[in-house]
Image (tube, rainbow, N blue to C red):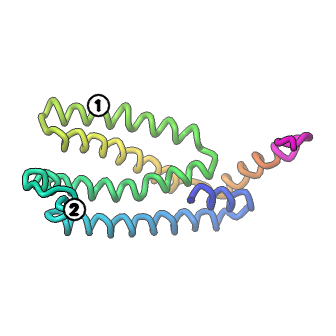
Amino acid sequence: MSSVRVGNELGAGHPKAAAFSVVIVTTSSFIISVIASIVVLALRHKISYLFTEGDIVANAVSDMCPLLAVTIVLNGIQPVLTGVAVGCGWQTFVAYVNVGCYYVVGIPLGALLGFYFKLGAQGIWSGMLGGTLVQTVILVWTTYRTDWNTEVELSLKRLDMWDEKKEPLLQG
């Protein structure tokens, strides 16, 4: 959703509206994810009983709920900022960040924490959270430093490139 909104504003030549859209959609998503995380943490000792009656599983789920809460918050922000980047035409950049953060940071860190430090599932999950955190920080920093006037100019150049095509893209 954020990619469409930002892309439309950039294509329409509205840098302030694009920047405002980024702030609103990121803030809204953050607030919703924080509320969901609070609910998970408040119900951490009860939530597993929706799926099981076993106390052992319920205790394990309760132990994992703080990681779930952090995951909810990060996954409330990261996909929105990924959408913003895609709306700006930064698909290649996002792909490199995604691959780097998960395969260079998340998986090795998860393996290290889970197996070497013997933290098990919590260690593996923490490693993947580390990758998501790095990705989120990179996307926040990149979005924060974006010159929206330049992004409008770049998007208008991309639009002009398509206007120069003589034949229709789809034959009917």
Which type of secondary structure does the marked residue at label 1 adopt?
A: helix
Task: Quarter of the image for the N terminus: give it.
Answer: bottom right
> Which residue is more in the foreground, 99 or 149?
99
Residue 54 image-quadrant placement: bottom left
Who's the residue at 51% across and 50% down the image?
82
> Which residue is more in the foreground, 171 or 78?
171
Which type of secondary structure does the marked residue at label 2 adopt?
A: helix
Q: Which residue is mark 1?
A: 108
Who's the residue at 34% across and 41% down the image?
131
Q: Give the side of residue 169 with respect to residue 60, left or right.
A: right
Image label count: 2
Measure the alpha-carbon separation of dots 1 and 2.
Answer: 33 Å
| Magenta stretch bounds | 161-172
Residue 61 in the image: state x and y as whole percent: 17, 53
> Which residue is more in the foreground, 38 or 48?
48
Q: Which mark is residue 67?
A: none
Task: Quarter of the image for the C terminus: give it.
Answer: top right
> Which residue is more in the foreground, 110 or 56?
56
Residue 123 in the image: state x and y as whole percent: 19, 40
Give the residue type that dot 2 points to.
Leu
Q: In this picture, is 22 found above or below 91?
A: below
Front label number (1 vs 2): 2
Q: Which residue is mark 2?
A: 50
Question: Which of disc 2 and disc 1 is earlier in sequence?
Answer: 2
Give the residue type that dot 1 points to.
Pro
Q: Give the side of residue 125 with respect to residue 102, left or right.
A: left
Who's the residue at 66% across and 52% down the image?
151
Q: In this picture, is 32 found above or below 78?
A: below
